[in-house]
Amino acid sequence: MSPRMGLDKVTIIEVAVELANNEGMEAVTLATLAKRLNIRTPSLYNHIEGLDDLRNKLALIGMNRLFHGLKAAIGNKTGDEAVHAMSIGYVQFSRQNPGLYELTLAAPNPENIEIQQAGKSIVELTIEVLQEYKLERENAIHAVRGLRSLLHGFASLEQKQAFGLPVNLDKSLHLLVNTFLAGLHSLK
């Protein structure tokens, strides 16, 4: 079967990203995607290998967008200011890309080199930001895990609308990051 005129991999991925972000990853099925594109499901196989391939492509896009969003948020900032900027960038990414965010959470597939590299880039960027705290490599990894855990917990609870009290969420995030930073300063 030949590819449909006007339909390409980029269009398929864009529609899948929109579907994921608007309706959640569970809504991203080949049948739903085909319906959105006004095609028959088998036509998708001219452009992608299947649902796993599509999810891998979306995970890679999500990780790359997260990396670039974090890098842009950090800019030339260093130290506490950079950690705060990175934290805000992380939570903003999850707010703007809830479906893609979900795909950035799983451990990268060891067989997918691109996803492995994208995940490694995020870790290395975080380690770079944390260099000012002069942590040994192992402690830097612990700090990366701690920061990710804090930010993921915050982002996930926010996505589930679990913060019901009428207190500014961005101020809560700022306080949370300050508490994490106080711990980092104590390690110096």
Image: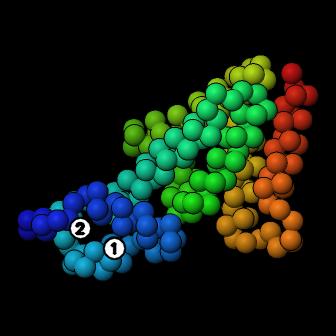
The label on residue 44 is 2
Q: Quadrant of the C terminus?
A: top right
Packing grade of label 1 (10 A; few <14, some 14-19, many >=20) is many
Residue at (46, 75) in percent of width and height? 27
Vertical comparison of 158 with 136: above or below: below
- Where residue 12 sits, quadrant-wise, is bottom left
Quarter holding residue 129:
top right
The reply to whether the C-beta atoms of the residues labelled 1 and 2 are less than 8 Å apart is: yes
**SS for dot 2:** helix
Horizontal and vertical percent position of residue 177 = 81, 44
Where does the image place residue 94, in percent across and percent down from the top left? 61, 57
Residue ID at (39%, 38%): 113
Give the amino acid at mark 1. Leu
Please tell me the numbered disc located at residue 33.
Answer: 1
Does any portion of residue 168 appear in the rendered image?
Answer: yes
Per the model, the C-alpha gap separating discs 1 and 2 is: 9 Å
Task: Compare marks 1 and 2 and give the one earlier in the sequence.
Answer: 1
